[in-house]
Amino acid sequence: MSPASGSLPRYIAVRLLLVLPMMWVLLTMVFLLLRVAPGDPVTAAVGDKLGPEELAARRAALGLDRPLVVQYLEYLGDVARFDFGATISDRRPVLDIIANQGGATLTLTLGAFLFACAIGIPLGRLAGRRRDSALDAGIRLVGVVSYAAPIFWVGIMLVGLVVAYVPGWPTFGIADSETLYYVPDRTGILLLDALLANDGVSLVDILQHHVLPCFTLGLLLSGVIIRLVRINVIRALDEDYVEAARARGIPERRVVRRHAFRNALVPVITVIGLQFALTLSGAILTERTFNWPGLGNELVTYVTARDYVAVQGLVTFFALAIVVVSVLVDILNALVDPRVRY
Amino acid sequence: MSTPAHRRRTGGRVRATARRAWRTEGLARWILLVGLVVTTVFVLFALFAPWIAPYGFDQNSSDGVRFPKTSGPGPGHLLGTNDQFYDIFSRVVWGARTAVLVVVLSVVLSAVIGVLLGLVSGYLGGWFDRITVFLMDALYSFPSLLLAIVFSFMLRERIGGSILAAALSLTAIYIPQYFRVVRNTTVAARQATYVEAAEALGARPITVMRRYLLPNVTSSVPVIGTLNAADALGTLAALGFLGLGIPPNEAADWGYDLSRALDDVAAGDLGPALWPGLAIILLVTALTLVGEGLSETLNPTLRRPRRTAVVLPARPEEAP
Amino acid sequence: MTADRLVAGEQDPAPVLEARDLRVWYGTDRGPVRAVDGVDLTLRPGEVVGLVGESGCGKSTLGRALLGLLPPGTARDGELRFRDQDLLTLRPREQHRLRGSGIGMIFQDPLTRLNPVMRISDHFAETLKVHEPGLSDAEVQARSVEALRLMGIPPTRFRAYPHEFSGGMRQRLMIALALVLRPAVVVADEPTTALDVLVEAQIIRILHDLRAASDTAFLLITHNLGIIAEACDRVAVMYAGRIVEVGPAREVFADPQHSYTRELLASTISLRTTGLHSIPGAPPDLVEPPAGCRFHPRCPDALAVCTERAPRPGRVGGVEVACWAAEVRHDTAAAAALTEAERRHPHRGEIADADEA
């Protein structure tokens, strides 16, 4: 076995070990932000509905009457057991919310990434190859504006256009109520459930509902991808090994594809991974715009209801997701670029 | 004391930058110019909102006559009215005031905190540095909107939804960016000969930081600041859209108006959504352009020498 | 010039590459840079020709121009014959095909010249299959491993990634990669400048051995005269976009004709060096090069004519040199045609005045 391939498992192992401190830091931050600040969560959420004894009982049940250090350790312990608590306002386990609503967020973001890559990579590559041309300037402007436009505004405008020009096309929610009624819940991911149920009509309906939200979120992400791909293609085309490949008579198209483009994608993968944060922000807004039954929508609902436990649970889950994605990105990177493994 | 000399230095640097920016060739100069012009227009809107806007931001009647609901553009209402009987043009102008106020407040606050924290952390090093870096990295890896939501959630319990609360919610998001840049530059600058010389001569840490490190590490702050302003504006609008921003009776908020416009659009009326949205896009794009232009001006290495096509002249006639 | 060709035709094989009055001008904001401005150069099969000069004299540009590896907007003209085609009139596609297979190139910094995400085997396979599409995988492997073996790299490293090799090994990889296509000409642009002295000696040894073993002609670009002395048959001295002296390496080193060559040789360090000599002034700006002989502002032997008319190449023994002072020294016909005023040695102030005008 060559040294390069041998070191990949080791690299992954080391990377996985680094996950724990990172998670610890993020969890500590979430706790600091949401628990240490003074104020009473129970009163904030249901203070106007319950009597004083009931409120005290609720507080005790949540452990809010104990010292902060104990609360902190309990919080860490709960998270380790994947227990994110139960909401104060309607007493739903947060894990249930994640299981029921997470699928919608997942298909939304994956679909958005698909759109974003389909738009962003070819445009970015084109702009990079034709650097400083009018085409390049135009593509860059599209990138800047698509990043500058508030995603919910883009969504609203698209809804307006669809309402005017494609009557009957779904603009809100993840599926028609009929579909929601007929597709049995197995995986928590509606799209997958429809596939498993072999229900073509429902599948088409769900996919149609996906188009607008995914495109909207994808547009936001494509701005970033255009920028990244463009600058990396430019950098890669300036690399010495690209000139060396030309000097060996490798045809220009192949030089761009094999040498410049593949190498340009390596940093792009990293930064796209970092865009997970942006995706999440975008998803919250997209879900709100299209009344999408996902986690972002739930989060905003519970924020408005002033439900500390729900907000803390969901934010904790997001923090964990961030860590997991960052690890996945690093591993993907190591697979593409052998130098990373060293 | 040293202050005047230092001022002069800073002033000289600002002027030199401005001169350099003006001399920048081609695209970078246009980018900067267009960005500055559009930004200035919005700042003028913000400053002179009471004189430019025909009505108040929460005014829904004039002379005892109630405004129409969601009317199109027409006499009396340049851009029409929205579903709360507000005049859209007035809301857009007043919205500029809210946006500029919140963004300036949050950018200045986060820059001051981030720069100071980065300076101290980078200069002192040790445990303080490590812990701060750790926390800042954690803060940075969090989605900015999520942070803003959490902060506004916290702050609404304490000080209610207000311009100050919105500005503070945004402040925390951007501190890590200044911190990172300033800390790294400080760590690098500490090793510079002139800093070592100053330390060897017995300068107190506070003096070293203020006189030697601060002027050197803050050169990238304007670029980060402008780009953050663009981002903060978007986040503010997002908070407003989610109903977590500034209540409509306290100030005009473009994001809030957009959330109200959602139903109108579904009913086929694009008007109430169009203008606040365009205002956001224009200002965000303008700020981004200023940031990009500045960064290209301040980092000339990003530019490359232009290649122009050569036409070879005919060969000189050989002398007989 | 004509005489040179006739003489060459009698004793040597036909040139594989021949540049006639080649010009390569870059476009910049300040105007065209005359990086190569009327160069004649001949490469014959199996010989190693050294190209020396200070940095910025156009030697790298000349090397790249042979392959057409020039930034967009650059103009080339003159004549560039490779075997029996003029490369300058060839269609871009055909020119591209000759790169690597006809004329190969080795670069200065081997560390950045290999694609970091491709295995060495992929580099070879790609190169071979582009030029010889019919090759089977086994043949590709055999040819590559053979090329590596010649460079002293064991076949076990064939599937490794570039970052697993040292700088010297990577330069040998680059040479192997250039030679695996069996090109007729290889341009080596400062192949040892980025390497340490021991590795440099190794690479020079390899080039030296290749000279005996193959028909490939090498154009070795360097500013290191020691390398020229060790590895080259002939040497061409370049100054400010022009070749000022060209001839057998031994002859040029023993008896340099052009003042620039002499100054260049005097400024190299050797065991006998007692004091450091350097050429006063700096190479000229190639956007507005000096009139007449381009070296005259820095030349200790400049004549009045040097400020006005560019010298034409003339022959002294086996060496071809473009220098008025050399013409006068050897009492050639060209020198005889000069007026008394033109033969005068002006002092510095006069040269500066002439240049102002």
Image: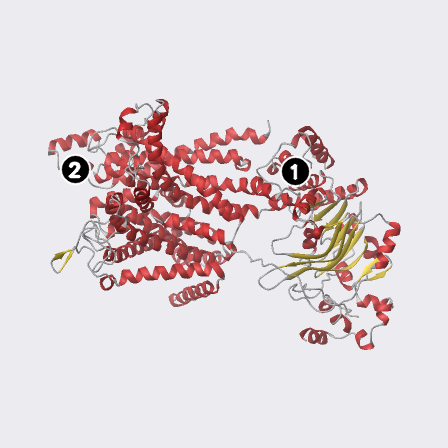
B101 in relation to A167, above or below: below
Query: SS of the residue at dot 2?
Result: helix
The number of callouts visible is 2
| On-image quarter of the N terminus of chain C | bottom right
Residue in the foreground of this view, choosing between B307 and B163: B307
**In the displayed structure image, the side of residue C119 where residue A303 appears, left or right:** left
Q: Give the crowd class for mark 2: few <14, some 14-19, many >=20 residues within 10 Å.
A: many
**In the displayed structure image, the side of residue C22 where residue B27 appears, left or right:** left
Amino acid at circle 1: Val
Residue in the foreground of this view, choosing between C89 and A167: A167
Q: Residue furthest right?
A: C10
Report the disc number at residue A43: 2
- Percent position (x, y) of residue B206? 38, 56
Q: Give the crowd class for mark 1: few <14, some 14-19, many >=20 residues within 10 Å.
A: some
Residue B297 appears in the rendering: no
Instruction: Provide the chain ID for the residue under circle 1.
Output: C
What residue is rendered at 47% in x and 39% in y? A269
Query: SS of the residue at dot 1?
Result: helix
Q: How is the image coloured?
A: secondary structure
Instruction: Provide the chain ID for the residue under circle 2.
Output: A
State the separation of the CA atoms marked 2 and 1: 74 Å
A85 in relation to B299, above or below: above
- Percent position (x, y) of residue C221? 72, 51
B127 in relation to C344, above or below: above
Amino acid at circle 2: Thr
Which residue is disc 1 drawn over?
A: C130
| On-image quarter of the C terminus of chain C | bottom right
Residue in the foreground of this view, choosing between B155 and C286: C286
Residue A43 appears in the rendering: yes
